[in-house]
Image (spheres, grey):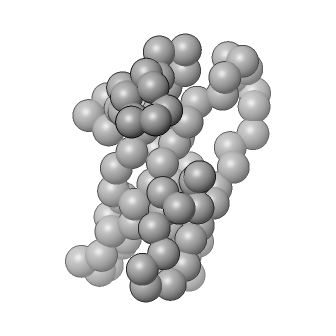
């Protein structure tokens, strides 16, 4: 159940795209000036835990584009590794 709550919370981040989580540049990837890129943490309800997320807006500006949610699992498994 907590997994479902985390997924729904992540989906709400996709709608909100918090400005404080905006990423403007990553080494070896350059500037994100053609579409939004976001990275941050989402609180998991009823725990002290957080889940890291990466969110990238659609590159073609389609407001109806689907949202893909990718979760990495296990200790030591970086979200950045899965993203790459």
- Residue for point 55% across, 36% down: 56
Number of numbered markers: 0
Measured along the vertical axis of the image, is residue 51 above or below residue 75? above
Measured along the vertical axis of the image, is residue 3 above or below residue 15? below
Locate residue 49 relative to residue 84 in the image: left or right: left
Q: Nearer the viewer, residue 24 or 61?
A: 24
In the rendered image, residue 38, in percent from the top left (x then y), is placed at 42, 38
Locate residue 45 relative to residue 79 in the image: left or right: left
Locate residue 4 relative to residue 61 in the image: left or right: left
Q: Which quadrant, please, contains the N terminus?
A: bottom right
- Residue for point 36% across, 26% down: 24
Q: Residue most toward the bottom?
A: 75
Residue 18 in sight here? no
- Residue for point 58% across, 67% down: 71
In the rendered image, residue 59, in percent from the top left (x then y), is placed at 66, 23
Q: Nearer the viewer, residue 59 or 28?
A: 28
Q: Nearer the viewer, residue 33 or 19?
A: 33
Measured along the vertical axis of the image, is residue 54 above or below residue 21? below
Measured along the vertical axis of the image, is residue 78 above or below residue 39? below
- Residue for point 54% across, 78% down: 73
Residue 46 in sight here? yes
Q: Nearer the viewer, residue 73 or 80?
A: 80
In the rendered image, residue 60, in percent from the top left (x then y), is placed at 72, 18
């Amino acid at each position: 159940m907590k997994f479902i709550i985390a997924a729904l919370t992540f989906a709400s981040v996709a709608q909100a795209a918090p400005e404080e989580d905006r990423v403007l540049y990553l080494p070896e990837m350059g500037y994100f000036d053609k579409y939004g890129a976001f990275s941050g943490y989402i609180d998991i309800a009823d725990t002290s835990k957080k889940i890291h997320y990466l969110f990238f807006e659609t590159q073609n500006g389609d407001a109806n584009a689907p949202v893909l949610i990718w979760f990495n699992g296990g200790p030591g498994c970086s979200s950045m590794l899965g993203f790459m």
